[in-house]
Image (cartoon, coloured by chain):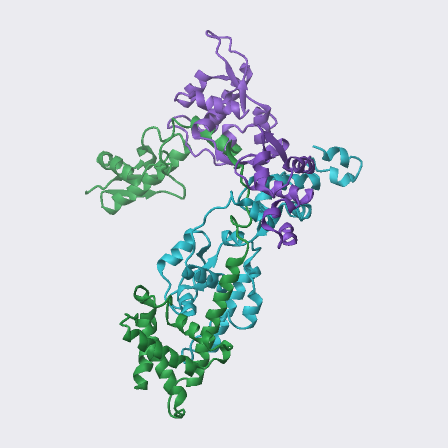
Chain colours: A green, B purple, C cyan
């Protein structure tokens, strides 16, 4: 037997074995290798923890041989198990090689015994479970049930805030427009510039810039403030362009502009 | 059950008659279990057919019925059969009411707002203020919620009904009277009015006052 | 209701609340009626949701359970829910009610047992225990019967899904919880519920501990 090769197989084939469900053959009602081993271990009529794994391995290998003679097609996991058991057998028979890595034959055998014992325990307890009184067989639920009728009641609610907002919405509906900065009291510098440019040609004399405020902006304080500021800024702009001259006689005195004489 | 064990070993043909009927308390349990599990009411005859030979389900039923007197379920006769039924006074437990709270629709809240600020107000007036017609359903809903009710008829041609808000409305919104509703000025101060005065309509202050006057006027009309 | 009469003049401090919970005897009737009406187990929470405000269905349940002791129907606990079920010793009367259930295959029964004792358990673990792969159909059948369901994913590489048993499973086998599975303690004491990896694979100690922790967690949770 080639020990190393079998080790490899065992490890790599675990997942293969698990995936090979469709290939399981039903040999004498056995579902799989562990199943077969469990049955065989029972024939030893001993505590599963004390079974001779060696004897078990021999029985299993004999079983596989017999199945082959009978030309029964065996699923891969049967053969993997056979190979693994043969490997285990060799491990148990030969004295341990101290140089060799990995678990000892005893450890592997103990684990196999544990697996068998666990499977047996699950079988026993499955039987115990199924032997319990079962609903619909031994005990019964209510025959005439009364379904709970579910009624859904919808209540509506609103807060005072909702109410007031709704009212405010209605009362201001006509005035409604998408929100923008309130600019109706703002006279922009661009507006001031376009107002001043055509007028400046006539400003031969020093004139108070306030006289250039647009019509209707002189009285309302907010508008007046804005128009004054923008007109002043516009006059600065024009002075920079060299179109006008600018003067202020005193602090807070009127600012005056006139067309640049040589311009 | 106990009855089988005591009699085993007897001659097969006599076995039947030698079977003693179970004690009446046991029969009562049997009737109870059968009635509980059956999908339909069960007749005395059916019970007798299913219970051990010699049983007297009619008598067991009398005891069982007594036992359930005043309980949450009762033993009732349906035709000539018997069944367990929930006690009638507990029928309310068999329904589960889930209350779902939803916000009033925009149409409803606006209508309600108009009624509360302008009451008494006719439907035509509500429509005029809202600028859209008011559906019957909206009014009905508010009436059903008991937030509005019919007021006096307006003494104008056609004598239209008016709507006013109810005490329930005031309670819900925590108001002592509809006059406590904040005016436009307060609404604006509270940031609820984000509008600006229409261009050229003078100072904001005067406009607000106007709004309040409007309202007072409407209330005075009553 | 009766509560007013019996309680008048008694403890004034309990009378303060306008809507007193019904007396416990009345609550017992209510629990009885609700449980009688339902084929499915009903949780305390559901009961509380359907009973009048302030009711204590858990306490009512204690009384009710006593009342039904030894009767033809019993009050049983299923997970965190309660249901009336006929006494198992009367099953022989119920041939008429017996529903022929699909006979489970040996594979399905074993898989079910493994899931119930080892839960939460992954498919790979089931296969490891049974020594053969578990066919999709077996799992599907158990899920379809509503005896098992998906549990939380295992926090190991690949995050495999786990399987756990359901309330229907407990109900079917008359178990109060998965902890009441026959022989569970003995199995655990014998180490037969350990997830012991084959020697030479990984670090057995840590993995074992992990497996045990998982399970303890689940059982405690219930």
Q: Nearer the viewer, residue B183 or C206?
A: C206
Residue A165 placement (x, y as % from top left): 47, 32
Q: Nearer the viewer, residue A157 or A141?
A: A141
Q: Nearer the viewer, residue B172 or B74?
A: B74
Q: In the figure, B160 relative to A113: above or below?
A: above
Residue ID at (49%, 28%) = B184
Residue ID at (53%, 26%) = B145
Q: Is residue C54 visible?
A: no
Q: Is residue A150 shown left or right of residue A67?
A: right
Residue A120 placement (x, y as % from top left): 48, 70
Residue furthest toward the top?
Answer: B157
Q: Is residue B6 visible?
A: yes
Residue ID at (51%, 48%) = A136
In the picture, the quarter occupied by the N terminus of chain A is: bottom left
In the picture, the quarter occupied by the C terminus of chain A is: top left
Q: How many marks?
A: 0
User: In which quarter of the view is residue A195 placed?
Assistant: top left
Residue furthest toward the left?
Answer: A263
Q: Nearer the viewer, residue A219 or A1?
A: A1
Q: Is residue B66 shown left or right of residue A121?
A: right
Q: In the figure, A141 relative to A38: above or below?
A: above
Residue A108 placement (x, y as % from top left): 42, 81
Residue B190 placement (x, y as % from top left): 51, 36
């Amino acid at each position: 037997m080639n020990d190393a090769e079998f080790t490899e197989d065992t490890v790599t084939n675990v997942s293969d074995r698990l995936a090979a469900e469709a290939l399981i053959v039903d040999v004498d009602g056995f579902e799989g290798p562990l199943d077969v081993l469990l049955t065989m271990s029972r024939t030893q009529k001993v505590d599963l923890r004390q079974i001779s794994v060696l004897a078990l391995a021999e029985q299993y290998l004999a079983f596989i041989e017999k199945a082959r003679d009978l030309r029964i097609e065996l699923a891969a996991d049967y053969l993997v198990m056979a190979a693994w058991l043969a490997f285990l057998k060799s491990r148990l028979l030969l004295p341990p090689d101290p140089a060799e890595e990995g678990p000892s034959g005893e450890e592997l055998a103990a684990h196999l015994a544990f697996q068998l014992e666990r499977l047996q325990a699950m079988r026993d307890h499955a039987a115990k479970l199924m032997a319990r009184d079962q609903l619909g067989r031994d005990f019964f639920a209510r025959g005439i049930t009364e379904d709970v009728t579910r009624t859904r009641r919808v209540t509506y609610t609103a807060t005072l805030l909702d109410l007031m907002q709704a009212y405010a919405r209605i009362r201001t509906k006509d005035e409604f427009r998408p929100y923008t900065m309130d600019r109706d009291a703002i006279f922009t510098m661009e507006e001031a510039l376009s107002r001043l440019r055509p007028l400046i040609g006539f400003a031969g004399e020093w004139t108070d810039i306030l006289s250039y405020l647009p019509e209707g902006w002189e009285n309302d304080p907010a508008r007046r403030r804005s128009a004054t500021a923008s007109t002043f800024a516009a006059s600065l702009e024009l002075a920079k362009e060299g179109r006008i001259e600018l003067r202020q006689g005193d602090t807070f005195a009127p600012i005056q502009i006139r067309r640049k004489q040589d311009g | 059950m106990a009855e089988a064990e005591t009699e085993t070993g007897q001659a097969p043909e006599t076995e039947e008659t030698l079977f003693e009927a179970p004690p009446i308390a046991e029969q009562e349990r049997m009737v109870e279990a059968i009635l509980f599990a059956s999908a339909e009411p069960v007749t005395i005859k059916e019970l007798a057919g299913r219970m051990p030979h010699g049983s007297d389900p009619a008598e067991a039923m009398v005891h069982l019925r007594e036992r359930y007197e005043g309980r949450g379920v009762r033993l009732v006769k349906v035709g000539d059969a018997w069944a367990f039924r929930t006690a009638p006074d507990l029928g309310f437990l068999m329904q589960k009411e889930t209350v779902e709270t939803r916000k009033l629709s925009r149409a409803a809240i606006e209508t309600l707002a108009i009624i509360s600020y302008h009451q008494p107000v006719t439907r035509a007036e509500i429509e005029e203020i809202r600028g859209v017609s008011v559906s019957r359903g909206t009014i009905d809903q508010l009436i059903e919620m008991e937030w509005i009710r019919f007021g006096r008829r307006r003494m104008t041609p056609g004598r239209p009904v008016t709507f006013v808000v109810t005490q329930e409305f005031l309670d819900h919104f925590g108001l002592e009277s509809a006059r406590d509703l904040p005016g436009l000025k307060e609404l604006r101060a509270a940031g609820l009015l984000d509008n600006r005065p229409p261009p050229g309509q003078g100072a904001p202050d005067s406009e607000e006052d106007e709004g309040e006057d409007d309202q007072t006027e409407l209330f005075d009309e009553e």
